[in-house]
Image (cartoon, grey):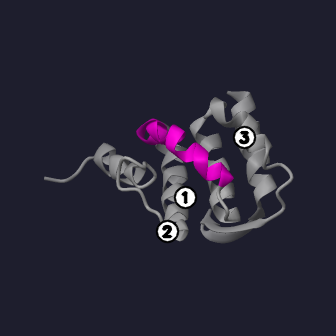
Amino acid sequence: MLASPREYAEVLVSYVREDGNFLEYEPLQQGAVWGIARVAETYSRLVADSIPHLLPFLNGSGASLRGLTAWALGLLGADEACSRVEGLLGDSSEVEFYWGRELKVVPVMDLAKGALSRLKKA
């Protein structure tokens, strides 16, 4: 029997849950957050329970983790993240990630601005 999309989403979210299959290696965390963001673009309800588990990543040491987390939280409509995402508006560190069929290099602050724009519309 094939797994349902919900089951795949639960496994993906488990990678950012400390009480789940938490990934301790930051590059793997980045991949999990990117995956959550990509799912959230179309099926945010499937990964909405990741919000409280993503919030600590906004304080991560790596720019990619901070930026991707802001992007994901914006897509998820995580109002509770607004003040923490605002804290990234001065972060000029660059994030490199695959999106829209190309590799993008974007400052964390731009991802934070995009997230806040989405959150303030909601």
Can you give x and y, in whole percent of width and height, for residue 14 in the image?
Answer: 38, 50
Q: Is residue 100 above or below residue 112?
A: below
Q: Give the labeled residue for mark 3.
A: 84
- SS type, badge 3: helix
Q: Residue drawn at (35%, 50%), measured in percent from left and top?
A: 20
Q: CA distance from mark 2 to mark 1?
A: 14 Å
Give the left or right position of residue 51, taking residue 115 as reference. Answer: left
Magenta part of the chain: 45-59
- SS type, badge 1: helix
Amino acid found under the numbered disc labelled 3:
Arg
Q: Give the labeled residue for mark 1.
A: 34
Amino acid found under the numbered disc labelled 2:
Tyr
Number of residues whose C-alpha sits closer than 10 Å to that of mark 3, classed few (under 14), some (14–19) or many (20 or more): some
Q: In the figure, residue 107 lies in which quadrant?
A: bottom right
Can you give x and y, in whole percent of width and height, for residue 121 in the image?
Answer: 73, 29
Q: Give the labeled residue for mark 2.
A: 25
Foreground mark, 3 or 1, reads 3
